[in-house]
Amino acid sequence: MLEATTAGKVGQELEAIEDSWLASAKLKLFTDAVAEIINASSLPNKSLVISRFLEEAKGKSNGEARAIAKRITGTDVYWSWDAPRTREGYYRLQGGCGCAINRAIHYAPYADAVWMESKLPDFSQAEEFAKGVRGVWPDMKYVYVSFTYYFSSLCYNTSYIWQVDITYTDQIGKD
């Protein structure tokens, strides 16, 4: 990207170069890199070993997950979060409900409430978020919103939005 920028490429040309790089880079999460190492190893019961690693590493920092991976595989797994940084220096992130749950769980000790925003309202996603957060922090208040959906549509019934955000989500995820 630096070479392309230095050569005077802009806009769609830079976007095409970045898209091409992304397609060929095979970006992956650390957990995916560990699974590849396990699958390529001589360890027996690979799927069981991967499941064990995922369970032990769930919610852990990268440093903690690396230690678990080394204990299980016997090797340091190569993975760099600096390699795929954007040209502006930002880190690439694989978002989604799991990412939002992990963020909420880690911020919960410092917050009065945690939240998740989605592109479209999705009850099953709201329930997954609620159960994920409440599984660790049962009394945490949280909000599940879809600002994009509500404010880009013709639905401006704000009493409904508040009802969904505060009243309704307070019950989601409770058994």
Image (spheres, helix red, strand yellow):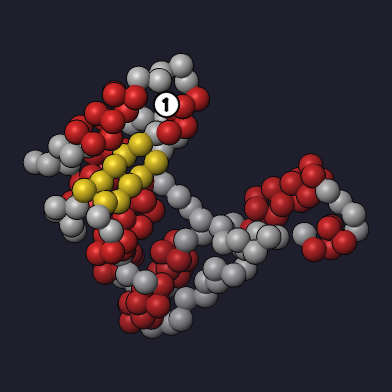
Residue at 41% of width from left, 30% of height from top?
A: 120
Residue at 46% of width from left, 16% of height from top?
A: 154
Residue 68 rendering spot, x and y as whole percentages: 33, 77
Residue 3, by quadrant, is: bottom right
Q: Residue furthest left?
A: 175
Residue annotated with mark 1: 150
Residue 8 rendering spot, x and y as whole percentages: 90, 54
Using residue 34 as the reference point, say whether residue 7 is left or right of it.
right
Q: Residues within 10 Å of mark 1 (few under 14, many from 20)?
A: some
Identify whether 167 is placed above or below 8. Answer: above
- Depth order, front residue of 109/103: 109
Asked whether residue 58 is in view, the answer is: no
Identify whether 54 is placed above or below 114. Answer: below
Residue at 23% of width from left, 36% of height from top?
A: 166
Using residue 27 as the reference point, say whether residue 157 is left or right of it.
left
Residue 24, by quadrant, is: bottom right
In which quadrant will I find the C terminus? Answer: top left
- Depth order, front residue of 153/71: 153
Identify whether 48 is placed above or below 72. Answer: above
Residue 37 rendering spot, x and y as whole percentages: 45, 70
Q: Residue furthest right?
A: 7
Using residue 24 as the reference point, say whether residue 139 is left or right of it.
left
Residue 137, by quadrant, is: bottom left
In which quadrant will I find the N terminus? Answer: bottom right
Helix, strand or loop at label 1? It is helix
Residue 112 rendering spot, x and y as whole percentages: 25, 55
Residue at 35% of width from left, 36% of height from top?
A: 145
As shown in the figure, which amino acid type bears the numbered disc 1?
A: Tyr
Q: Residue furthest top?
A: 154
